[in-house]
Amino acid sequence: MKNFPFISMREWIDHLSSVGLLVENDQPVKLRNDISALSKQIADKGGPAVLHTNVEGHPGWRLMHDGLTTKHKQAIALGIDEKNFCRNLADKLARGPRIRPIEINNAPCQEEVFTGADIDLALLPAPTTTQFENPPYITAGIQHLKDPESEWVNMAIRRFQLKSSRSFCGLFAPYTHDGVIYQRYIDQGKSMPAAVVIGADPVYFMLSQLSTVPGESEIPLWGAITGEPLQIVKCLTNDLYVPAHAEIIIEGTIDPTTRVFEGPFSEFPGYFSGCFSLPLFNVTAITMRSDPIYYYLCMGMEPGEGHELHSMVEAVTLSAIQEIIPELSDVSILSCGGFTTAMSVRKDRKRPGLVRQLAMAVKGHHVGRLIKNLFVCDDDIDVHNPAHVMWAMGSRFQGERDILVINDVIGCVLDPSIPSLGRDSNLISCSIFDCTEPMAPYDEPYKRGLALPDMTASAKEAYERILKK
Amino acid sequence: MKPAVTVEYKERMEQIFKNRSWLDQNIDSIKTKYHDSWIVVTGGKLVAAGALTASEAISAAGADFDPETSIVFQVPAKIQFIWQQNKPI
């Protein structure tokens, strides 16, 4: 059994199977509705990763989903202790060595090559997510773009609506790193080379959730987590580099002027997005392993794998904001991919104005872009437990003094609660809820501490005895 | 076995692409006439329009509705976001 680190998705599959966290399904499965509905049930009720071996219309293919739907699976994939997950991951990202990738030849992801007239996106067994989704979307594709003016390569998971057998379009907004890079190609009037990776190893897949500092690539962080260099290979029809052990690579170009009508799609805030006019990705090659495994990510109303993957964002947010506010002790994305987030600050280091300073730091930093509702608690609250956060709000919060609203700050184009066009597009109100214990002279009711019984050794013994009966 | 796609699935996708392409190319006029209603596109043409719900549109399409290849679409009043040719909004 292969253990951490897992350099490919199939090493990950083998490990999950060996520890009882993956099930193989050899019964026929349809791409319309069956797989997405199964994935939703797994997320709602708990369940294993699934590897389908009998996929409608696609002999020779396998399809996997829910490989990282729980923190337990993610902790295994990242080689960290699940307890204090966020802090452990933040430490690993901060202290791990930045190891340059190494280029290899004869990469598994190029065992089969489709170019020219052989390119056909119908070859990919892309499931639909909702009832009327047509054409289907690629939902777990990691887009790679390289800045024309530097060595900066940005990778990010995006949604891609298939448009023809040789083209698709992806949603990325101008204020994202993809958008910044694309704008430089538009300014130069040049087509932008691009690659989409499907079926990367679990660490690479999770890194695609990150938003690093502009100009900094996510790829060296693979070495920080695994302790090894990532093996990469150059694309066949452009100069981008992709993980050599991935399942499928789609290479192509995005020209600066063509725009295509796209959408709607079931997005992470839980509603369908609107429709967009987006750049078009023209495929120049599809390469893959000789027995490829397609990876599907079910997006839409949470819970879902796409939402659980934001644990990587929690760790990066903790790490980034702690540099400005060292009193920050934990970060938890509670819902909507970050729209509602809870943070805790060290009770032993509290000072007047700390919560407001934290709010300013979060919204002034790129990691805080998606945060719309921020609950700030003391560190005696487990911010990963929504009930604890709500208890803190119930016992330590007064609306008259403890709400701060910052208007007209950048949010997310997919937030269904904001105006979708015009001047206010993408601008939100960020609300900060101070759920920390008030400081003196208002702390009289809190001086005696929490009302809890003393957990004596005899009480613990009695509890164990009762459980055994 | 090498990865493959069946002829039947390939033809199905070609129909879907044809229907979606018709919608993409005609979206401006579709928005003007049928915004906030449901339409059905089959065989590269509009076969039902102006319905209040998806079910109504499918009923109106009758035998022209194909559950695998038809585009059943709720027409927006506006396009939410547009990448400009020369600069983003």
Image: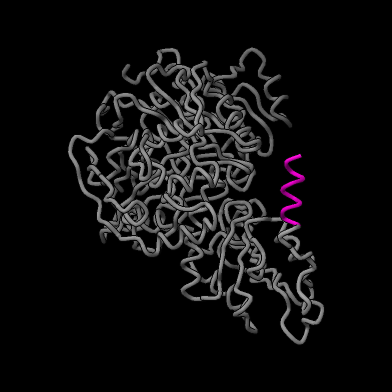
Where is residue A269 drawn, in percent x and y?
62, 48
Q: Residue at x 76, y 77 (%)?
A: A401
Can you say whether A206 is above or below A265 in the image?
Answer: below
Residue range highlighted in magenta:
A459-469
Q: Residue at x 42, y 50 (%)?
A: A79
Can you say whether A331 is above or below B40 in the image?
Answer: below
* Residue A248 sits inside the magenta stretch: no
Q: In this orientation, which residue lies closer to the viewer: A351 or A451?
A: A451
Q: In this orientation, which residue lies closer to the viewer: A430 or A59?
A: A59
* Residue A464 sits inside the magenta stretch: yes
Where is residue B86 drawn, in percent x and y?
39, 56
Q: Quadrant of the C terminus of chain A?
A: top right
Identity of the residue furthest to the bottom in this view: A441
Where is residue A83 drawn, in percent x and y?
54, 55
Q: In this orientation, which residue lies closer to the viewer: A339 or B29?
A: A339
Q: Quadrant of residue A370?
A: bottom right
